[in-house]
Amino acid sequence: MFTDIALHATLPASDFARAKAWYAEKLDLLPIAEDDQPGGAWYESGGVRFLLYQSTFAGTNRATAASFAVDDFAAAVAFLRERGVTFEEYDFGDFKTENGVLTLPDGNQGAWFQDSEGNVLAISTM
């Protein structure tokens, strides 16, 4: 039943104005629509929509909330670093980042960072 139904991410923001500014300044993303409810805005990236909304629970999830699949990983990392984004460092034994980047044996790469609200986002070639 769900194979043909669109899925969208929802990302909480404890300070909605700050979050909107962060997405504009760091990712060049602007809302495509504002929700009627206070503190809600829809964004679109690569044909996929996500909702940024006001919530007191922002930043409480320590797992990846959303991931951007990129064609040019090095360019995406450079773009984000130029805008002041700091990448997370992880060490899970076989999976360890170096300078914020995980490189798998097959050559795929990933990097994780937090938005202004503490939501964990990722970029990857996977």
Image (cartoon, grey):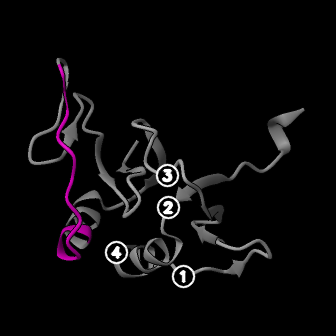
Point out residue 125 in the picture as x, y percentages from the top left corner. 37, 48
Q: Quadrant of the C terminus?
A: top left
User: Is the Cβ of the residue at disc 3 closer than 8 Å to that at disc 4?
Assistant: no
Q: Amino acid at mark 1?
A: Leu
The relative height of residue 57 versus residue 40 in the rendered view (above or below) is above
Nearest the viewer among 14 and 93 is: 14
Does the magenta run of residues contain 85? yes
Marks 3 and 1 sit apart, C-alpha to C-alpha, by 20 Å
Q: Earlier in the sequence, mark 2 or mark 1?
A: 2
Residue designated by label 2: 14
> What's the magenta region?
80-92
> Could you say which disc has been placed on residue 58 in the image?
3
> Could you say which disc has been placed on residue 26 in the image?
4
For the residues carrying marks 2 and 4, which lies nearer the camera in this image? Answer: 2
- Which SS class for mark 3? loop
Dot 4, crowdedness within 10 Å: few (<14), some or many (≥20)? some
> Could you say which disc has been placed on residue 16 in the image?
none
User: Is the Cβ of the residue at disc 1 closer than 8 Å to that at disc 4?
Assistant: no
Q: Amino acid at mark 3?
A: Ala
Does the magenta run of residues contain 123? no
Residue 30 is drawn in which quadrant?
bottom right
Residue designated by label 1: 30
Q: Earlier in the sequence, mark 3 or mark 2?
A: 2
Nearest the viewer among 17 and 96 is: 17
Name which residue lies at 50% across and 78% down.
Answer: 17
User: Is the Cβ of the residue at disc 3 closer than 8 Å to that at disc 2?
Assistant: yes
Q: Earlier in the sequence, mark 3 or mark 1?
A: 1
Name which residue lies at 71% across and 79% down.
Answer: 34
Dot 3, crowdedness within 10 Å: few (<14), some or many (≥20)? some
Q: Amino acid at mark 4?
A: Lys
Marks 3 and 2 sit apart, C-alpha to C-alpha, by 5 Å
Q: Is residue 110 left or right of residue 16?
A: left
